[in-house]
Image (cartoon, rainbow, N blue to C red):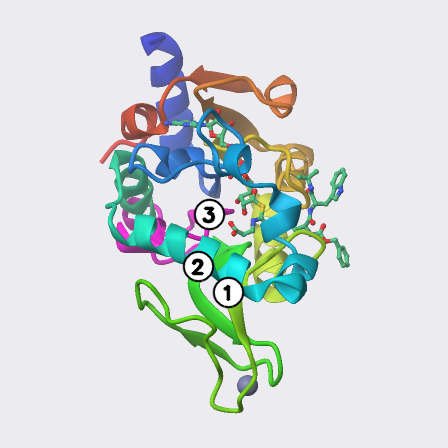
Amino acid sequence: MDTHKIKMIRERLAASSAPVALTGAGVSAESGVPTFRGPGGLWKTYKPEDLATPEAFERDPYLVWEWYNFRREKIASVSPNPAHYALAGLEASKPAFTLITQNVDGLHCLAGSRNVLEIHGSIWALRCTACGNSSENRDVPIEILPRCTCGGLLRPGVVWFGETLPEDTMNAAFEAAEKADFMMVAGTSGVVQPAASLVSVAKRAGAFTVEINTDATPLSDIMDERLEGRAGEILPLIITA
Ligand code: BV8
Ligand code: ZN
Protein backbone atom coordinates (compact mmCIF):
# COMPACT_ATOMS: atom_id res chain seq x y z
CA MET A 1 0.00 0.00 0.00
CA ASP A 2 1.46 3.37 -1.06
CA THR A 3 1.35 5.15 2.30
CA HIS A 4 2.57 8.43 0.80
CA LYS A 5 -0.31 8.45 -1.71
CA ILE A 6 -2.79 7.46 1.03
CA LYS A 7 -1.57 10.36 3.17
CA MET A 8 -1.86 12.84 0.27
CA ILE A 9 -5.40 11.69 -0.51
CA ARG A 10 -6.42 11.71 3.15
CA GLU A 11 -5.24 15.30 3.46
CA ARG A 12 -7.04 16.35 0.28
CA LEU A 13 -10.25 14.79 1.55
CA ALA A 14 -9.84 16.41 4.98
CA ALA A 15 -9.42 19.80 3.26
CA SER A 16 -12.36 19.33 0.86
CA SER A 17 -15.55 21.32 1.39
CA ALA A 18 -17.81 19.37 -1.00
CA PRO A 19 -16.72 15.71 -1.10
CA VAL A 20 -18.74 13.14 -3.05
CA ALA A 21 -18.50 9.34 -3.22
CA LEU A 22 -19.90 7.08 -5.95
CA THR A 23 -20.08 3.46 -4.81
CA GLY A 24 -20.82 0.18 -6.54
CA ALA A 25 -21.13 -3.49 -5.70
CA GLY A 26 -17.44 -3.75 -4.80
CA VAL A 27 -18.10 -1.80 -1.60
CA SER A 28 -20.49 -4.57 -0.46
CA ALA A 29 -18.29 -7.42 -1.69
CA GLU A 30 -16.45 -7.72 1.66
CA SER A 31 -19.80 -8.08 3.39
CA GLY A 32 -20.35 -11.16 1.27
CA VAL A 33 -22.78 -9.70 -1.30
CA PRO A 34 -21.90 -11.01 -4.79
CA THR A 35 -20.92 -8.35 -7.32
CA PHE A 36 -22.35 -8.32 -10.83
CA ARG A 37 -19.41 -8.59 -13.21
CA GLY A 38 -16.51 -9.86 -11.17
CA PRO A 39 -15.52 -13.51 -10.63
CA GLY A 40 -18.53 -15.31 -9.08
CA GLY A 41 -20.59 -12.29 -10.00
CA LEU A 42 -24.33 -12.43 -10.49
CA TRP A 43 -24.03 -11.86 -14.23
CA LYS A 44 -21.81 -14.92 -14.46
CA THR A 45 -24.71 -17.16 -13.39
CA TYR A 46 -27.59 -15.17 -14.83
CA LYS A 47 -27.96 -12.97 -17.92
CA PRO A 48 -28.89 -9.39 -16.94
CA GLU A 49 -31.31 -9.13 -19.85
CA ASP A 50 -33.09 -12.23 -18.51
CA LEU A 51 -33.64 -10.72 -15.09
CA ALA A 52 -32.99 -7.00 -14.72
CA THR A 53 -35.28 -5.66 -17.44
CA PRO A 54 -39.00 -4.77 -17.58
CA GLU A 55 -39.37 -7.23 -20.47
CA ALA A 56 -38.01 -10.06 -18.33
CA PHE A 57 -40.49 -9.18 -15.60
CA GLU A 58 -43.33 -9.03 -18.12
CA ARG A 59 -42.30 -12.40 -19.54
CA ASP A 60 -41.65 -14.26 -16.29
CA PRO A 61 -42.39 -12.36 -13.05
CA TYR A 62 -41.89 -15.55 -11.05
CA LEU A 63 -38.31 -16.00 -12.28
CA VAL A 64 -37.47 -12.36 -11.62
CA TRP A 65 -39.06 -12.45 -8.14
CA GLU A 66 -37.20 -15.68 -7.33
CA TRP A 67 -33.94 -13.93 -8.25
CA TYR A 68 -34.77 -10.96 -6.04
CA ASN A 69 -35.79 -13.30 -3.22
CA PHE A 70 -32.40 -15.04 -3.56
CA ARG A 71 -30.69 -11.62 -3.32
CA ARG A 72 -32.93 -10.38 -0.46
CA GLU A 73 -32.10 -13.48 1.57
CA LYS A 74 -28.38 -13.03 0.91
CA ILE A 75 -28.41 -9.31 1.73
CA ALA A 76 -30.54 -9.79 4.87
CA SER A 77 -27.92 -12.24 6.18
CA VAL A 78 -24.90 -9.91 5.88
CA SER A 79 -23.69 -6.81 7.73
CA PRO A 80 -22.04 -3.61 6.59
CA ASN A 81 -18.24 -3.75 6.37
CA PRO A 82 -15.56 -1.16 7.28
CA ALA A 83 -16.04 0.53 3.89
CA HIS A 84 -19.68 1.32 4.72
CA TYR A 85 -18.81 2.46 8.25
CA ALA A 86 -15.98 4.70 7.04
CA LEU A 87 -18.34 6.48 4.64
CA ALA A 88 -20.96 6.84 7.40
CA GLY A 89 -18.23 8.35 9.58
CA LEU A 90 -17.31 10.83 6.85
CA GLU A 91 -20.89 12.08 6.72
CA ALA A 92 -20.78 12.65 10.48
CA SER A 93 -17.59 14.70 10.23
CA LYS A 94 -18.44 16.45 6.94
CA PRO A 95 -22.18 17.19 6.66
CA ALA A 96 -21.62 18.51 3.10
CA PHE A 97 -20.56 14.98 2.03
CA THR A 98 -22.87 13.34 -0.56
CA LEU A 99 -22.92 9.56 -0.95
CA ILE A 100 -24.22 8.36 -4.31
CA THR A 101 -24.67 4.62 -4.59
CA GLN A 102 -25.58 2.25 -7.40
CA ASN A 103 -26.13 -0.45 -4.81
CA VAL A 104 -29.67 -1.50 -3.93
CA ASP A 105 -28.67 -3.49 -0.82
CA GLY A 106 -29.28 -0.73 1.75
CA LEU A 107 -25.99 -1.45 3.55
CA HIS A 108 -24.90 2.22 3.52
CA CYS A 109 -28.07 3.17 5.46
CA LEU A 110 -27.60 0.19 7.79
CA ALA A 111 -24.08 1.44 8.56
CA GLY A 112 -25.49 4.83 9.57
CA SER A 113 -25.23 6.94 6.39
CA ARG A 114 -28.24 9.25 6.14
CA ASN A 115 -27.59 11.40 3.08
CA VAL A 116 -27.56 8.52 0.55
CA LEU A 117 -28.67 8.88 -3.06
CA GLU A 118 -29.76 5.37 -4.14
CA ILE A 119 -29.79 6.06 -7.87
CA HIS A 120 -30.71 2.47 -8.82
CA GLY A 121 -33.40 2.19 -6.15
CA SER A 122 -33.63 -0.26 -3.28
CA ILE A 123 -34.16 -4.00 -3.11
CA TRP A 124 -36.41 -3.41 -0.09
CA ALA A 125 -38.73 -1.13 -2.06
CA LEU A 126 -41.77 -2.39 -3.95
CA ARG A 127 -43.77 -0.58 -6.63
CA CYS A 128 -47.22 -1.45 -7.94
CA THR A 129 -47.25 -2.03 -11.71
CA ALA A 130 -50.91 -0.97 -11.79
CA CYS A 131 -51.33 2.06 -9.50
CA GLY A 132 -47.65 3.00 -9.07
CA ASN A 133 -47.89 2.98 -5.27
CA SER A 134 -44.46 2.54 -3.61
CA SER A 135 -43.93 0.70 -0.34
CA GLU A 136 -41.17 -0.93 1.65
CA ASN A 137 -41.16 -4.65 2.44
CA ARG A 138 -38.44 -6.50 4.31
CA ASP A 139 -40.00 -10.00 4.22
CA VAL A 140 -37.33 -12.59 3.51
CA PRO A 141 -38.42 -14.32 1.40
CA ILE A 142 -41.33 -12.26 0.08
CA GLU A 143 -44.33 -14.35 -0.88
CA ILE A 144 -44.53 -14.39 -4.69
CA LEU A 145 -46.28 -13.06 -6.57
CA PRO A 146 -46.81 -10.05 -4.28
CA ARG A 147 -49.97 -8.03 -4.86
CA CYS A 148 -50.87 -4.41 -4.09
CA THR A 149 -54.07 -3.60 -2.18
CA CYS A 150 -55.41 -2.50 -5.57
CA GLY A 151 -54.79 -6.03 -6.85
CA GLY A 152 -51.93 -4.94 -9.11
CA LEU A 153 -48.70 -6.97 -9.37
CA LEU A 154 -45.88 -5.55 -7.23
CA ARG A 155 -42.36 -5.30 -8.69
CA PRO A 156 -38.98 -4.66 -7.03
CA GLY A 157 -38.41 -0.91 -6.55
CA VAL A 158 -35.11 -0.98 -8.45
CA VAL A 159 -34.04 0.52 -11.79
CA TRP A 160 -33.79 -2.08 -14.54
CA PHE A 161 -31.90 -1.77 -17.80
CA GLY A 162 -33.70 0.50 -20.21
CA GLU A 163 -35.50 2.28 -17.35
CA THR A 164 -34.89 5.86 -16.33
CA LEU A 165 -33.34 6.52 -12.96
CA PRO A 166 -35.42 8.26 -10.27
CA GLU A 167 -35.43 11.87 -11.49
CA ASP A 168 -35.14 13.73 -8.16
CA THR A 169 -32.41 11.39 -6.91
CA MET A 170 -30.46 11.66 -10.16
CA ASN A 171 -30.80 15.44 -10.26
CA ALA A 172 -29.44 15.62 -6.71
CA ALA A 173 -26.57 13.34 -7.75
CA PHE A 174 -25.68 15.51 -10.76
CA GLU A 175 -25.92 18.62 -8.60
CA ALA A 176 -23.55 17.13 -6.01
CA ALA A 177 -21.10 16.08 -8.75
CA GLU A 178 -21.23 19.58 -10.28
CA LYS A 179 -20.33 21.10 -6.90
CA ALA A 180 -17.76 18.50 -5.91
CA ASP A 181 -14.17 19.41 -5.12
CA PHE A 182 -13.29 15.80 -4.27
CA MET A 183 -14.84 12.58 -5.65
CA MET A 184 -13.95 9.05 -4.64
CA VAL A 185 -15.25 6.26 -6.86
CA ALA A 186 -15.25 3.00 -4.91
CA GLY A 187 -16.08 -0.55 -5.97
CA THR A 188 -17.66 0.09 -9.33
CA SER A 189 -16.75 -1.26 -12.75
CA GLY A 190 -17.93 2.05 -14.19
CA VAL A 191 -19.75 0.39 -17.11
CA VAL A 192 -23.32 1.35 -16.27
CA GLN A 193 -24.72 4.65 -17.52
CA PRO A 194 -25.78 7.26 -16.60
CA ALA A 195 -24.22 6.50 -13.15
CA ALA A 196 -20.65 6.40 -14.45
CA SER A 197 -21.09 9.78 -16.19
CA LEU A 198 -21.20 11.40 -12.74
CA VAL A 199 -17.43 11.01 -12.63
CA SER A 200 -16.91 13.11 -15.78
CA VAL A 201 -19.33 15.70 -14.38
CA ALA A 202 -17.25 15.99 -11.20
CA LYS A 203 -14.02 16.14 -13.20
CA ARG A 204 -15.42 18.94 -15.37
CA ALA A 205 -16.34 20.76 -12.16
CA GLY A 206 -12.67 20.60 -11.18
CA ALA A 207 -13.01 17.87 -8.53
CA PHE A 208 -9.99 15.79 -7.55
CA THR A 209 -11.01 12.23 -8.46
CA VAL A 210 -9.69 9.01 -6.94
CA GLU A 211 -10.67 5.43 -7.78
CA ILE A 212 -10.63 2.77 -5.07
CA ASN A 213 -10.88 -0.64 -6.70
CA THR A 214 -9.20 -4.04 -6.62
CA ASP A 215 -8.91 -3.83 -10.42
CA ALA A 216 -8.52 -1.28 -13.19
CA THR A 217 -11.78 -0.13 -14.83
CA PRO A 218 -12.80 1.96 -17.87
CA LEU A 219 -12.80 4.93 -15.47
CA SER A 220 -9.21 4.42 -14.32
CA ASP A 221 -7.63 6.48 -17.10
CA ILE A 222 -9.62 9.62 -16.30
CA MET A 223 -9.00 9.51 -12.54
CA ASP A 224 -6.45 11.83 -10.93
CA GLU A 225 -5.35 9.01 -8.64
CA ARG A 226 -6.00 5.29 -8.15
CA LEU A 227 -5.72 3.25 -4.97
CA GLU A 228 -5.61 -0.42 -5.89
CA GLY A 229 -7.05 -2.64 -3.17
CA ARG A 230 -10.12 -3.48 -1.11
CA ALA A 231 -12.55 -0.70 -0.22
CA GLY A 232 -12.91 -2.15 3.29
CA GLU A 233 -9.20 -1.63 3.84
CA ILE A 234 -8.57 1.62 1.93
CA LEU A 235 -11.58 3.77 2.83
CA PRO A 236 -10.88 3.67 6.60
CA LEU A 237 -7.31 4.78 5.79
CA ILE A 238 -8.30 7.86 3.80
CA ILE A 239 -11.28 8.84 5.93
CA THR A 240 -9.93 9.99 9.25
CA ALA A 241 -12.29 9.80 12.20
C1 BV8 B 1 -31.01 3.88 -18.97
C2 BV8 B 1 -30.75 -3.46 -11.44
C3 BV8 B 1 -32.23 4.61 -20.80
C4 BV8 B 1 -30.88 -3.15 -10.03
C5 BV8 B 1 -28.94 -2.44 -12.65
C6 BV8 B 1 -24.60 0.62 -24.55
C7 BV8 B 1 -23.58 1.45 -24.17
C8 BV8 B 1 -23.70 2.25 -23.02
C9 BV8 B 1 -24.87 2.23 -22.27
C10 BV8 B 1 -25.87 1.40 -22.67
C11 BV8 B 1 -25.76 0.59 -23.79
N1 BV8 B 1 -26.89 -0.11 -23.90
C12 BV8 B 1 -27.74 0.22 -22.90
C13 BV8 B 1 -27.13 1.16 -22.15
C14 BV8 B 1 -27.69 1.83 -20.97
C15 BV8 B 1 -27.60 0.89 -19.78
C16 BV8 B 1 -26.16 0.53 -19.50
O1 BV8 B 1 -25.44 1.31 -18.92
N2 BV8 B 1 -25.75 -0.68 -19.91
C17 BV8 B 1 -24.37 -1.07 -19.73
C18 BV8 B 1 -24.30 -2.33 -18.87
C19 BV8 B 1 -23.76 -1.29 -21.10
N3 BV8 B 1 -28.13 1.65 -18.68
C20 BV8 B 1 -29.44 1.58 -18.42
O2 BV8 B 1 -30.21 0.87 -19.01
C21 BV8 B 1 -29.94 2.53 -17.35
N4 BV8 B 1 -31.09 3.18 -17.85
O3 BV8 B 1 -30.00 4.15 -19.54
O4 BV8 B 1 -32.23 4.21 -19.44
C22 BV8 B 1 -33.27 5.63 -20.92
C23 BV8 B 1 -32.88 6.95 -21.05
C24 BV8 B 1 -33.87 7.88 -21.21
C25 BV8 B 1 -35.21 7.51 -21.18
C26 BV8 B 1 -35.56 6.17 -21.01
C27 BV8 B 1 -34.60 5.22 -20.85
C28 BV8 B 1 -30.32 1.75 -16.10
C29 BV8 B 1 -29.06 1.30 -15.41
C30 BV8 B 1 -29.44 0.57 -14.11
C31 BV8 B 1 -29.50 -0.87 -14.40
N5 BV8 B 1 -29.78 -1.61 -13.18
N6 BV8 B 1 -29.32 -3.37 -11.79
C32 BV8 B 1 -30.40 -4.37 -9.28
O5 BV8 B 1 -31.13 -5.36 -9.25
O6 BV8 B 1 -29.28 -4.29 -8.75
S1 BV8 B 1 -27.31 -2.36 -13.10
C33 BV8 B 1 -26.27 -3.17 -12.04
O7 BV8 B 1 -24.97 -2.66 -12.38
C34 BV8 B 1 -26.43 -2.84 -10.56
O8 BV8 B 1 -27.49 -1.97 -10.30
C35 BV8 B 1 -25.14 -2.14 -10.19
O9 BV8 B 1 -25.40 -1.13 -9.31
C36 BV8 B 1 -24.71 -1.61 -11.50
C37 BV8 B 1 -23.24 -1.24 -11.59
O10 BV8 B 1 -22.45 -2.40 -11.29
P1 BV8 B 1 -21.26 -2.20 -10.23
O11 BV8 B 1 -21.86 -1.70 -8.97
O12 BV8 B 1 -20.18 -1.41 -10.84
O13 BV8 B 1 -20.82 -3.69 -9.97
P2 BV8 B 1 -19.82 -4.58 -10.85
O14 BV8 B 1 -19.96 -5.99 -10.40
O15 BV8 B 1 -20.01 -4.24 -12.29
O16 BV8 B 1 -18.37 -4.06 -10.45
C38 BV8 B 1 -17.88 -4.28 -9.14
C39 BV8 B 1 -16.55 -3.55 -9.08
O17 BV8 B 1 -16.05 -3.65 -7.75
C40 BV8 B 1 -15.49 -4.13 -9.98
O18 BV8 B 1 -14.80 -3.07 -10.62
C41 BV8 B 1 -14.54 -4.87 -9.02
O19 BV8 B 1 -13.20 -4.81 -9.48
C42 BV8 B 1 -14.69 -4.05 -7.79
N7 BV8 B 1 -14.46 -4.75 -6.51
C43 BV8 B 1 -14.79 -6.03 -6.20
N8 BV8 B 1 -14.47 -6.25 -4.90
C44 BV8 B 1 -13.97 -5.09 -4.40
C45 BV8 B 1 -13.95 -4.13 -5.43
N9 BV8 B 1 -13.50 -2.87 -5.25
C46 BV8 B 1 -13.06 -2.56 -4.02
N10 BV8 B 1 -13.06 -3.41 -2.98
C47 BV8 B 1 -13.50 -4.69 -3.14
N11 BV8 B 1 -13.47 -5.53 -2.08
ZN1 ZN C 1 -51.62 -0.81 -6.79
**Mark sitting earlier along the chain (2/1):** 2
The quarter holding residue 15 reads: top left
Label 1 belongs to which residue?
156
Q: Which mark is residue 63?
A: none
Q: Nearer the viewer, mark 3 or mark 1?
A: 1
| Cα–Cα gap, marks 2 and 3 | 9 Å
In contact (CB < 8 Å): disc 2 and disc 1:
yes
Q: Amino acid at mark 1?
A: Pro
**Which quarter of the figure has residue 2?**
top left
Location of residue 160 in the rendering, given as x and y in whole percent from the top left corner: 62, 55
Q: Tell me the CA gap for discs 2 and 1.
A: 6 Å
Question: Which residue: 60% across, 33% down?
Answer: 190
Can residue 164 be seen here? The reply is no
**Relative vertical location of residue 99 with respect to residue 24 in this rendering, above or below:** below
Position of residue 94 measured from the top left corner of the image (x, y, whole percent): 35, 46
Which one is nearer the viewer's eye here, 162 or 113? 162
- Where residue 102 sits in the image (x, y, percent)? 51, 47
* Residue at mark 2: C-beta within 8 A of ligand 1: yes
Magenta-tinted stretch: 92-116
| 155 is higher (above) or lower (below) than 120 | below
User: Which amino acid type is marked by label 2?
Assistant: Ile
Q: Secondary structure at mark 3?
A: loop
Does mark 1's beta carbon lie closer than 8 Å to ligand 1?
A: yes
- Circle 2 is placed at which residue position? 123
Residue 84: quadrant of the picture:
top left
